[in-house]
Image (spheres, rainbow, N blue to C red):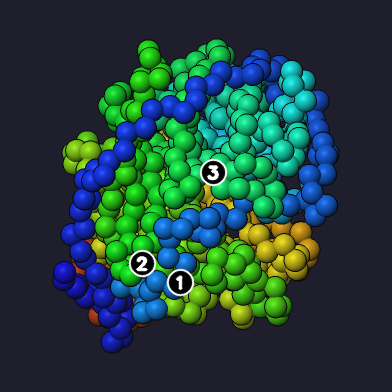
Amino acid sequence: MRFTGFQIGKGLIILSLIVPFRATGFAQTIVRHPAEILLPVAYDVTPPLAAMPIIQEDDRNLHGEREVPNQGFSYLFNPNQDFAKSLPEPDPVLQAAPGPYQTNSTLVNRDGIGNYLGYIPPDAVGDIGTNHYIQAVNAAFAVYSKSGAVLYGPVSLATLWQGFPLPHTSDGDPVVLYDHLADRWLITQFSLPNFPFGPFYELIAVSTTSNPLGSWYRYSYKFNTFPDYPKLGVWTNGYYMSVNMYATAGDGGIWMGPAAIELERDSLLNGKAGRMVIFQLGVNDNHMLPADLDGPPPGAQTPGLFLGADDQPGTNDRLVLYKLTNNWLTPQNAKFTGPAYINVAPFDGNLCNDAQACIPQAGTSGKLDPLSRRMMNRLQYRNFGSYKVLMANHTVDVDGSDHAGVRWYELRASDTTFSVYQQGTYAIDANHRWLGSIAMDGNGNIALGYSVSGSTMFPAIRATGRRAGDPPGQMSFMEEQIIAGGGVQTSTINRWGDYSCLTVDPVDDRTFWYTNEYYASSGFDTWKTRIASFTIDNLPVSNKKYTETGYAFNLKCYPNPVTKLATINWNLKTEGFVELNIYDFTGRKTETLVHSDMVPGINQVVYDASDLPAGMYFCQLRVNGVAESIEIIIAR
């Protein structure tokens, strides 16, 4: 082991633990074959969504308090798990203070769907496509433009399922996926028409084109056990799904273990009866997530990946990786192989003894669910050619006092063996951070969104991030407030989340889109959601000046438009390291004008733009990590 120091402020050093953790291989490997192969019990195609009658009301009252079922995934069901506090010491990879950099890149920041149908929790999800963003919450969805304009909705998810051949109900746990390989959309939810007993159904809709306001292929798959908490991922040879299986829905359901599922992607994209292949694990196995592809695809025969976290007694904590090798010619020969263990820095996954009432809110004794026993949505996969990446996160107790923080990982593999490339636990003050979602853009920059709350603050939505090449294990950007909470959840139902969702624009592969919940004012079930988009890189995408923190450099260019020569000047208030760069509109750096320490005062450089084509450019000034930018027009 070795430690590296990372200077982020006066006299403050954060130590990043860098341990060359390696997967231990498939020791005690189990090869499972399908427990079941299903065909849809019904499938059809809708008229264009924009032409279908809108349903605004819910189709039934699921519970007296309208709580969407999510079984407590308690390790009380699992005799092999140590339920005691496992790490009373501070987390060994804790980041206890914010990074030094400040972003200026928020693009869209607007309210999403609110709780007009009266459900708890929202289960906010969304994904970004070529021209649209789709958000879904429990029992509702909406379609937005990339500028944040509402194009459709919000409407009940029952709108999409009206006229379907079976008596389905719209019961929650939605998932939205954009398949960038096919330029198509997926929306799923479960249906519990016989609640709390079976049969249960998973409903899947696939857009017939890239336009979500067009028609959709619809499918229904029947389960005899309750497939709770479904999560999906895009892969080249299938859509992969994980669920937590219970004998019945609602309180008191008997834990049956997780299941890994593969859907026949090619058939679903063409309106055919796509097969569903199910691998059932045991009651001693942990919740897991399927890998969800961003960017270039893996090889056509690359197995699908599933990952879970395993909080072992003592300090032998690990991640658990499985591989699903499909066989659509002979589906019964498909294989689900694992576990492979990936050793990680010790963590304590036991917050408040798994009680839902754990995260405090200001001004109330009511607390919120930390969901610390689950990997958090999404498990992102990227293929960089010479290496592959998995991004993952979950909630942990950072110091043994039920203080929630977000443990995150970047796993890398040059072949098929993943190991920890970097890891960290983000908990920069006494407040609690949980319900994280993490993703990496096409340049290796990482963003992390989450909920934050504490005894002196209302629950809020925030984000942080790091640039590729920053010190490992550190979120090097200051924490950004997406929206401050204006109140607390007063309901005796402690559920919060149950998840949030961070995705990456497939067009530029650099703009992150995040959605999560908050309260604008205190209420029983009056949650709102927020949708925000932002970038984490050196390309300025706004002209925000940091007057609120004293960093206004008064950056100017004259003349502007520029034909050949221009004078760029700024006011440096304190000594610092100065970078002055010119970028084109794609984010490519065209020239570095200054890269040195400078003293306070008025500074200027003469810029010769005669070699650049006409168009719009950005001039960015960075001083000690703080940036200010202006647009420059080059005219000919």
- Gap between marks 2 and 1 measured at Cα: 8 Å
Numbered label attached to residue 525: none
Establish if 65 lies above or below 187.
Answer: below
- Gap between marks 3 and 1 measured at Cα: 23 Å
Between 371 and 6, the one lying in front of the other is: 371
Q: Residue furthest front?
A: 79
The three-letter amino acid code for the residue at tag 1 is: Ala
- Gap between marks 2 and 3 measured at Cα: 23 Å
Left or right of 141 on screen, residue 209:
left
Numbered label attached to residue 84: 1
Establish if 456 lies above or below 499.
Answer: below
Q: Which residue is drawn at 38% across and 28% down?
A: 33
Give the residue number, with chain letter if any, for mark 3.
256
- Where is residue 342 shown, x and y percent of the image? 27, 53
Bin the neighbour count of mark 1 within 10 Å (Cα to Cα): few under 14, some 14-19, many 20 and up: few
Q: Which residue is drawn at 50% across and 75% down?
A: 402
Secondary structure of residue under mark 2: loop
Q: Which residue is drawn at 75% across and 40% down?
A: 195
Quarter of the image where the C terminus is located: top left
Left or right of 285 on screen, residue 43:
right
Numbered label attached to residue 313: 2
The three-letter amino acid code for the residue at tag 3 is: Met
Is residue 260 visible to the viewer in this orientation of the structure? Answer: yes
Bin the neighbour count of mark 3 within 10 Å (Cα to Cα): few under 14, some 14-19, many 20 and up: many
- Mark before the other along the chain sequence, 3 or 1: 1
- Where is residue 104 shown, x and y percent of the image? 45, 60
